[in-house]
């Protein structure tokens, strides 16, 4: 193998690694180990108690977070939120009419879920009955799959409450 092909291989490896990291940042982070179910024998399965029903989404007007934090407890900083939004901009734009992997977030505060023109939403999002208030966004950004089960938004959420408040302040500010 000559130096030129080694250099190309190195750049290819770097590109693959960068792509994998970007996708991991946007995904729920579930590993293959979690996804694979262990094998069980039929006798054990028959004796096992019934599985608990899947958790249901909070009501459209319920803004309770997992941690109990409330949006009103934080003062969002739009400038800091712009920095937090960098992780979102791979999939979302703040310019009206610019849909990417996800819909445009221009004017999201006060908008009904699933209503951006030209974006193909899941039925789960379209039929959620949610109006994106700052409080509901605060809850949603904590764990999107909890709030809208079945959404195609493959993002684990923003666990830091202040960062959530900051990105909401950025989204609520005129762009």
Image (tube, rainbow, N blue to C red):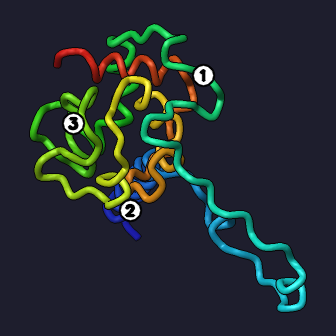
Q: Is residue 147 above or below residue 11?
A: above
**What residue is at 67 percent from the left and 63 percent from the top?**
53
Distance, label 3 to label 2, CA atoms, is: 33 Å
Question: Quarter of the image holding residue 135?
Answer: top left
x%, y% of residue 35? 62, 68
**What residue is at 20 percent from the left and 28 percent from the top?**
107
Crowd tier of the residue under label 2, counting other residues whose Cα lies within 10 Å: few below 14, some 14–19, many 20 or above: few
Q: Residue 40 versus residue 129: which sits nearer the camera?
A: 129
**Which dot marks residue 145?**
none
Q: Residue 136 versus residue 19: which sits nearer the camera?
A: 136
Q: Earlier in the sequence, mark 3 or mark 1?
A: 1
Q: Residue 15 versus residue 139: which sits nearer the camera?
A: 139
Question: Quarter of the image holding residue 123?
Answer: bottom left
Q: Nearer the viewer, mark 3 or mark 2?
A: 3
Q: Secondary structure at mark 1?
A: loop
x%, y% of residue 44? 89, 84
x%, y% of residue 149? 48, 55
**Which dot marks residue 9?**
2
x%, y% of residue 153? 39, 51
- Find disc 1 in the rendering and name its residue: 69
Q: In this orientation, does residue 141 appear?
A: no
Q: Earlier in the sequence, mark 3 or mark 2?
A: 2
* Pointers 3 and 1 in contact (C-beta within 8 Å): no
**What residue is at 53 percent from the left and 43 percent from the top?**
58
């Amino acid at each position: 193998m000559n130096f030129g092909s080694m250099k190309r291989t190195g750049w290819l490896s770097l590109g693959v690694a960068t792509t994998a990291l970007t996708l991991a940042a946007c995904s729920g982070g579930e590993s293959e180990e979690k996804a694979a179910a262990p094998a069980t024998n039929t006798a054990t399965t028959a004796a096992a108690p019934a599985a608990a029903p899947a958790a249901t989404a909070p009501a459209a007007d319920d803004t309770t977070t997992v941690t109990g934090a409330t949006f009103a407890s934080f003062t969002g900083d739009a400038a800091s939120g712009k920095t937090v939004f960098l992780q979102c901009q791979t999939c979302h734009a703040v310019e009206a009419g610019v849909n990417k992997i996800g819909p445009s977030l221009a004017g999201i505060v006060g908008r009904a879920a699933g209503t951006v023109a030209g974006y193909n939403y899941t039925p789960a999002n379209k039929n959620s009955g949610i109006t994106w208030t700052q409080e509901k966004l605060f809850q949603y950004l904590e764990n999107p799959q909890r709030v809208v089960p079945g959404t195609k938004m493959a993002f684990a959420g923003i666990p830091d409450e202040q960062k959530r408040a900051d990105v909401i302040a950025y989204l609520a500010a005129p762009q």
